[in-house]
């Protein structure tokens, strides 16, 4: 009697059915799935009928389950900008602008007029000046830096009382 394991199709033949998935990921998942079929299911008297379809479906199920690990959630924490829930939500217009600009190179630190190295803060500072009328501006990319700069500006060399509930949490540690 021939060993049922020899009837399990080759990885290469199975990969032809998974062209909608990244090749390396599909291959790695197929190796895992066929390995399980060879080890565990042989002893359970599995049926050879439709074995290729069963392996393909099991592989697709795994690939689809792992496809999107980030999921949309509702922020019901009471904290407006909860870092455990990612970044602050962006409006669709901002996302569309990011899509357009991030598909290639930009003039982030190049002064197009002079061809020399520029200053990335000049781009946003000019816009903030127009929007707010402020004399100058500084943009930071996280709340901890913003709080530090505000305190450095308005409470320099003075005591600042901060409740424990307002401690800045970064990376799971309280500071």
Image (cartoon, grey):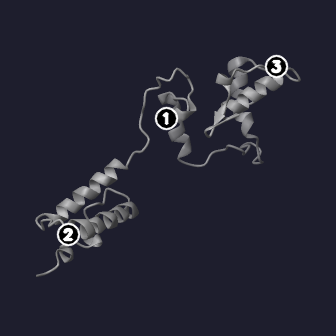
Disc nearer the start of the sequence (2/3): 2
Q: Residue at x 72, y 32 (%)?
A: 145
Image quadrant in which you'd find residue 37: bottom left
The residue pinned by badge 1 equals 96
Disc nearer the start of the sequence (3/1): 1
The image shows residue 3 at horizontal and vertical percentages of 17, 78
Question: Can residue 15 be spotted in the picture?
Answer: no
The image shows residue 75 at horizontal and vertical percentages of 47, 25
Specify the quadrant that holds the C terminus: top right
Residue 29 vs 133, above or below: the answer is: below
Q: Residue at x 38, y 59 (%)?
A: 22
The residue pinned by badge 3 equals 154
The image shows residue 137 at horizontal and vertical percentages of 76, 27
Give SS at disc 1: helix
Give how far apart the Cα atoms at labels 2 and 3 are: 72 Å
The residue pinned by badge 2 equals 42
Q: Residue at x 74, y 17 (%)?
A: 133
């Amino acid at each position: 009697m021939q060993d049922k394991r020899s009837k399990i199709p080759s990885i290469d033949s199975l990969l032809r059915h998974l062209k909608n998935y990244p090749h390396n990921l599909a291959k790695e998942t197929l190796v895992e799935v066929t390995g399980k079929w060879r080890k565990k299911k042989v002893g359970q008297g599995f049926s050879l009928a439709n074995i290729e379809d069963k392996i393909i479906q099991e592989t697709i199920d795994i690939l689809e389950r792992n496809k999107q690990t980030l999921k949309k959630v509702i922020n019901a924490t009471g904290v407006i900008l909860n870092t455990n829930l990612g970044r602050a939500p962006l409006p669709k217009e901002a996302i569309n602008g990011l899509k357009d600009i991030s598909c290639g190179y930009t003039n982030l630190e190049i002064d197009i007029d002079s061809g020399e190295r520029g200053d990335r803060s000049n781009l946003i500072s000019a816009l903030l000046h127009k929007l707010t009328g402020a004399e100058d501006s500084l943009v930071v990319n996280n709340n901890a830096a913003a709080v530090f700069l505000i305190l450095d500006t308005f409470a320099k060399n003075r005591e600042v009382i901060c409740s424990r509930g307002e401690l800045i949490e970064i990376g799971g540690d309280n500071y």
